[in-house]
Amino acid sequence: MRYSGFRVIAEALTGHKGWKPVWRDPDPKPDYDYIIIGGGGHGLATAYYLAKEFGQARIAVLEKGYLGGGNVGRNTTIIRSNYLLDGNEPFYEFSLKLWEGLEQDFNYNAMVSQRGIINLIHTDAQRDAATRRGNAMILHGADARLLSRDEVRQMYPWLNFDNARFPIKGALMQPRGGTVRHDAVAWGYARGADSRGVDLIQNCEVTGMRIENGRIKGVETTRGYIGAKKVGVAVAGSSSKVMAHAGMRLPIESHVLQAFVSEGLKPLIDGVMTFGAGHFYVSQSDKGGLVFGGDIDGYNSYAQRGNLPVIEDVAEGGMALMPAIGRVRLLRTWGGIMDMSMDGSPIIDKTHIEGLYFNGGWCYGGFKATPASGWCFAHLLAKDESHITARAYRFDRFLKGLMIDEKGQGATPNLH
Amino acid sequence: MIIHHPILGPRDAQEFVYLGDASLIDRPDGMTAGVEAFHDYLYQRTNPAGEHQELWYHEQGDRSWLVVTRNTVTHEITKVELAREVARARGRTK
């Protein structure tokens, strides 16, 4: 069923009796050409593009819980392509371009809203770094603007401009950045994949991999053995657990990142704002809640909940930047598990096992990457070669000294 | 989280800095080990869901390194040792 304004009106006039379930709930077949492990944003996008753009068939997505129940439903919904390094910026700009056409492409309202993102600047050194980053973005075809202090003041006059430690001196803005309704991304991709014949199999956890003579034959699951010619793993957060079935160790640690939403307020923040010096970023949802977050908790964790010290730290960051929110009540906090990689950048690559492919290591930047990640992973699965924008995301970059380290922190995942 | 320091008793985890898997104690010998061994040491992690031995540094305390055994699913801490003693037990000289 194609969605349109006409369809909404027609259904309204006929008592909304024509709406159908958005996807099937099939049982697994004995074997497939492609199995994607992980029914989150990246896995569903991979299946969608495999079927739609690369013309492949006999595809299944295996999800241990329900579709979109992991990190795609737990993030703070920001899209942007404001990266510095050559290995990253073309990929994220490709992703942003896909976001811009996504709703028409998969005929689903994902509420893509490009209201702009600003990164605040407090020192001359930060302005130099922001200028360099902005120029790098423009060179790769993205958009960037350096805002003066007065321009920031015009946008948000109520910010704490004269904070003794971090006075606001300006900002780097990407006008095309913004937010997207995160669940709808998973649902839109799921619907698009299902309508092209992809089997979306839920409550199906992978418990083992059958590997013979260095080649993958299929996966053991809680719903029985399923054979496959190629298996793609897109389970960021649980990557080490799943790849351990193939006997692999990864350059990844799992960490918990918390997010927060306040009670609903009148319109206060139009776009997205990051206050890097205070480990704080914020946007406002359509319901009026301030959606914000800060640093990861900093220790290995698979618990989808964090601890109080980081909540205090994030609240302090918020108060330093926006004293006006002092009386706003916090509505909810939650945590998600991040694949923190050794250089802060992701991996989309083949493994040493023939037919087994890996997509993960997204740190806390996976959501914005969803469309390009799916596209590039589908490209790799279908053609056995990396997409041009994802060629740097290799497993062996650590061995060869080709790290993509945006923050220059080295092999300390909890600092990226 | 409360870390029961072997010398100082119960301390808030906020006083500590986290480094990572305690396998970082077992650095290969730089004179004999090859590039691959160092790559595995520096970049590869087992990253278990469950019991995890990890290095914490008591920066705002006595500046000691600890090996904390903690469950990464429940955050429960079951054992805290001085890293020095763990390293010696594994055959390191200091």
Image (cartoon, coloured by chain):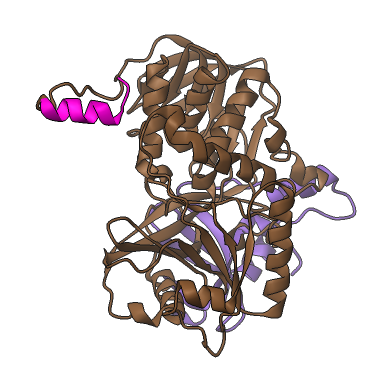
Chain colours: A brown, B purple
**Residue A179: % across, % down:** 44, 51
Counting the numbered discs, the total is 0
- The answer to whether residue A236 is left or right of residue B85 is left
Image position of A90 with respect to A176: above or below: above
User: Farthest left residue?
Assistant: A15
Residue A221 at least partly seen: no
User: Farthest bottom residue?
Assistant: A164
- The answer to whether residue A358 is left or right of residue B1 is right
- The answer to whether residue A132 is left or right of residue A49 is right
**Residue A322: % across, % down:** 41, 78
Region of the chain picked out in magenta, as a range: A1-13
Q: Main secondary structure of the magenta part?
A: helix
Image position of A180 with respect to A305: above or below: above
Give yes or no for residue A2 being in the magenta stretch: yes
Q: Which of the 4 image quarters holds residue A392? A: top right
For the C terminus of chain B, the image quarter is bottom right
User: Farthest top residue?
Assistant: A30
Task: From the viewer's side, name the closer residue of A375 and B56.
Answer: A375
Residue A73 at least partly seen: yes
Q: Residue at x 68, y 66 (%)?
A: A130
**Residue B35: % across, % down:** 84, 46
Give yes or no for residue A202 being in the magenta stretch: no
Q: Which of the 4 image quarters holds residue A125? A: bottom right
For the N terminus of chain B, the image quarter is bottom left
Q: Residue at x 65, y 41 (%)?
A: A91
**Residue B34: % across, % down:** 85, 45
Image position of A125 with respect to A356: above or below: below
Image position of A212 with respect to A276: above or below: above
User: Farthest right residue?
Assistant: B31
